[in-house]
């Protein structure tokens, strides 16, 4: 059996660690746009599921544009906030802010039956981690039309 010096082992280990680190960082950087797109599609699919529209990865964008008619952001007083994209508001991040600075994204949808619906993101603490989803309400804001949890 061949004997390797300690110096050889350390140099080999350092080269391997650097090579693997470079490969992992390249993979993370190159795959980031695809990961963000997948998260966007998953978010849209969940919203559509809350109004009873089943979507696939391929038709999610088309169905979202068809059924989700409007989106806006409300502040803690219930007033509309301009200049903020509702789709980019992350409820988890908003909950960490003081109440006066929190925003709530709201989406309006119209399914095939013509009913006007409001879609609200919901999030809470679960047993093994956060539970999040979308709650769709009928226009009277008292009747639940549908819900989708993850």
Image (cartoon, helix red, strand yellow):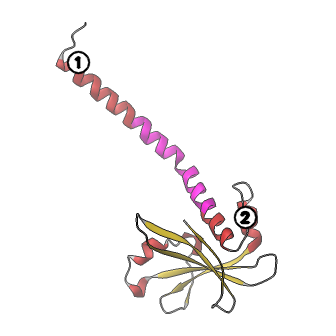
Residue 58 lies, in percent from the top left, at 73, 54
**Residue appearing at x 65%, y 64% in the figure:** 45
Q: Hey, which quadrant is residue 22 in on the image?
A: top left
Looking at the rendered structure, the secondary structure element under dot 2 is: loop
**Residue appearing at x 40%, y 86% in the figure:** 99
Describe residue 44's horizontal placement relative to residue 31 as left or right: right
Please identify the residue farthest to the front as the structure is shown: 127
Residue 142 lies, in percent from the top left, at 63, 91
Q: Earlier in the sequence, mark 1 or mark 2?
A: 1
Task: Sort mark 1 into few (<14), some (14-19) or many (20+) by Cα contacts within 10 Å.
Answer: few
Distance in Å between CA atoms under marks 1 and 2: 58 Å
Nearest the camera: 123 or 109?
123
The answer to whether residue 96 is magenta is no
Describe residue 108's horizontal placement relative to residue 82 as left or right: right
Tell me the mark number nearer the camera, choosing from 1 and 2: 2
Q: Which mark is residue 8?
A: 1
Q: Are marks 1 and 2 in contact (CB under 8 Å)?
A: no
Describe residue 119's horizontal placement relative to residue 58 as left or right: left
The answer to whether residue 25 is magenta is yes
Residue 88 lies, in percent from the top left, at 55, 69
**Residue appearing at x 38%, y 30% in the figure:** 19
Q: Which mark is residue 54?
A: 2
Task: Sort mark 2 into few (<14), some (14-19) or many (20+) by Cα contacts within 10 Å.
Answer: some
* Image vertical order of residue 127 relative to residue 103, above or below: above
Which segment did they paint magenta? 22-42
Residue 21 lies, in percent from the top left, at 37, 37
Looking at the rendered structure, the secondary structure element under dot 1 is: helix
Please identify the residue farthest to the top as the structure is shown: 1
* Image vertical order of residue 54 relative to residue 17, above or below: below
**Residue appearing at x 42%, y 42% in the figure:** 25
How many marks are shown on the rendered structure? 2
Image quadrant where one finds the C terminus: bottom right
């Amino acid at each position: 059996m061949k004997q390797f010096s300690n110096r050889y082992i350390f140099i080999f280990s350092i080269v391997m660690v650097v090579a693997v680190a470079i490969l992992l960082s390249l993979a993370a950087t190159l795959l980031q746009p695809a990961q963000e797109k997948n998260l966007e599609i998953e978010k849209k699919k969940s919203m559509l599921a809350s109004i009873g529209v089943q979507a696939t990865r391929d038709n999610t964008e088309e169905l979202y544009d068809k059924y989700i008619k409007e989106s806006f952001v409300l502040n803690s007083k219930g007033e509309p906030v301009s200049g903020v994209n509702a789709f980019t508001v992350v409820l988890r991040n908003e909950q960490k802010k003081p109440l006066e600075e929190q925003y709530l994204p709201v989406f309006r949808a119209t399914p095939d039956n013509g009913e006007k619906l409001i879609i609200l993101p919901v999030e809470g603490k679960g047993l093994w981690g956060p539970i999040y989803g979308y709650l769709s309400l009928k226009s009277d804001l008292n009747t639940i039309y549908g819900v989708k949890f993850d």
